[in-house]
Amino acid sequence: MNPEPDRADALSKATFIITLITCVILILAVFFFILPAKGFWMIDNYLPRVSTFAGDIDRLCNLITFLVGFWFVISEAVLFYFIFKFRKKPGVKAQYLSGEKKEHKRWISIPHFLIIICDVVLIAGTIIVWANIKQRLPEAQETIRVTGAQWAWIFQHPGPDGILDSDDDITLIDELHIKKGTVYHFELQSNDVLHGFSIPVFRLKQDAVPGRVITGWFEATKTGSYDIQCAEMCGIGHGLMVARLTIEEPDQHVRWMESLNSTMMADAQSDAGGGDFE
Ligand SMILES: [Cu+2]
């Protein structure tokens, strides 16, 4: 018997296993230590968090990414190891394994139970976030009405009296103005088809369903101007169904309402003046 091929085979096997383990350690280190240290998983590095519940949604997204990513790296490493270990070898016949023996079943059942534990963690995390954001609505300080229509957003704001459906309501197309630090309820409806009311910086997305009024809430934590979009394919103009959210300090918001009132008064007067020439 010639020991040389055996030694070469053992060396090749050891090299492969060392390379594989090094790769797994490197990938896990990059995934769990280097990227977090650089702020890579901080979703707010790419999209600011501007609502009180945005952090809960981001943490849930990160939890899902970490757990799924961990199992992805492990399963790919095991796959490549087996591809190498059971590669074609001279004089070795392929075997058919039915998977019925106990020692074979373990390869299925142990990862299966570990993944079920991770699923339970994910489901528990999701239920907590869902209950806190979608089911427990804090008491409203103001209420707005949002209507999706092909292809625009119609926003009905309460006027200076802060009460919706009163004479001083302000209705704007594709423009929503709110105050920072105020809990708003929104009454979401659709005039025609399904639309998706989406404010990415709030991490808010809610379908508008024809025939239904869906109530949700948000509280903005920063001032600024941000995107509102439709997140549901609602026809040929879907891509144009964008609107602007402006978040102001309460005193700025009052000034905005006053400026709007004076503009509306001026428009009404010029309309009345135009009538004299007819
Ligand atoms: Cu739409």
Image (tube, rainbow, N blue to C red):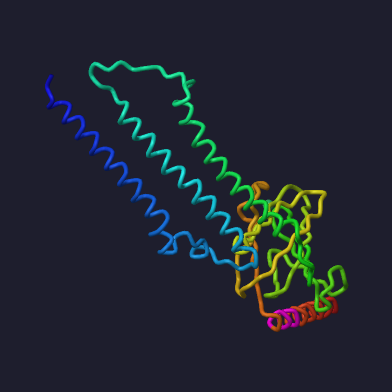
Which residue appears at 59% of the width and 48% of the height? 122
Q: Residue lying furthest front in this view?
A: 102
Residue 119 in the image: x percent, y percent? 58, 44
Q: Is residue 43 above or below residue 278?
A: above
Residue 10 in the image: x percent, y percent? 21, 32
Which residue appears at 63% of the width and 47% of the height? 123
Which quarter of the rendering shows the C terminus?
A: bottom right
Which quarter of the rendering shows the N terminus?
A: top left
Residue 255 in the image: x percent, y percent? 71, 83
Q: What secondary structure is the stretch in magenta mostly built from?
A: helix
* Image quadrant in which you'd find residue 49: bottom right
- Depth check: 215 or 31 in front? 31
- Depth check: 28 or 237 in front? 28
Residue 229 falls left or right of residue 72: right
* Image quadrant in which you'd find residue 200: bottom right
Q: Is residue 110 above or below residue 135?
A: above
* Image quadrant in which you'd find residue 88: top left
- Depth check: 53 or 198 in front? 53
Q: Is residue 84 above or below residue 271?
A: above
Q: Which residues are magenta?
A: 252-258
